[in-house]
Amino acid sequence: MAPEEPVFEFPLSFGTGGTGGLVRQLHGQLRAAILDRRLLPGSRLPSTRRVAGAYRLARNTNRCL
């Protein structure tokens, strides 16, 4: 099996502690990538299914699978 292509061009990491849930962590990291210009205007975002599968997140809740 070939290695899967990265979902984003920058790493994301999710902790189990801290304030907020996984949705807040994902939002914060994507927002930071936009502000740091690692995610440029016009960039296509991956599908929610792809993100959920790659990071083992549920698509419409803030829980891990």
Image: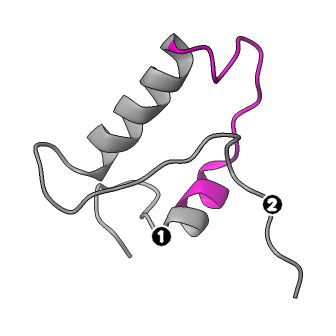
Q: Which secondary structure dominates the residues rendered in magenta? A: loop
- In terms of secondary structure, where does tag 2 sit? loop
Which residue lies at the image location 59% right of the left edge and 50% below the top edge?
Answer: 48
Q: 61 or 17, which is in the foreground?
A: 17
Comparing 61 with 6, the one in front is: 6
- Residue 6 x, y percent position in the rendering: 73, 55
Residue closer to the observer: 48 or 31: 31
Q: Quadrant of the C terminus?
A: bottom left
Work out how far the residue at label 1 is from the one at label 2, CA to CA, in angstroms.
Answer: 16 Å
The residue at 11%/49% (across/down) is 18
Q: Which residues are magenta?
A: 36-52
Amino acid on which the number 2 mark rests in the picture: Glu
Note whether 22 is above or below 43 in the view shown: below
Image quadrant of residue 1? bottom right
Instruction: Establish if 50 lies above or below 37.
Output: below
3 lies above or below 52: below
**Residue ID for mark 1:** 56
The answer to whether residue 16 is left or right of residue 41 is: left
Residue 60 is drawn in which quadrant? Answer: bottom left
According to the picture, the residue beneath numbered tag 2 turns out to be 5
Residue type marked 1: Arg
Q: Residue at x 67, y 44 (%)?
A: 8
Q: What is the x, y in percent for residue 39? A: 65, 23
- The foreground one among 60 and 34 is 34
Q: Earlier in the sequence, mark 1 or mark 2?
A: 2
Q: Check if residue 32 falls in the magenta segment.
A: no
Label 1: element kind? loop
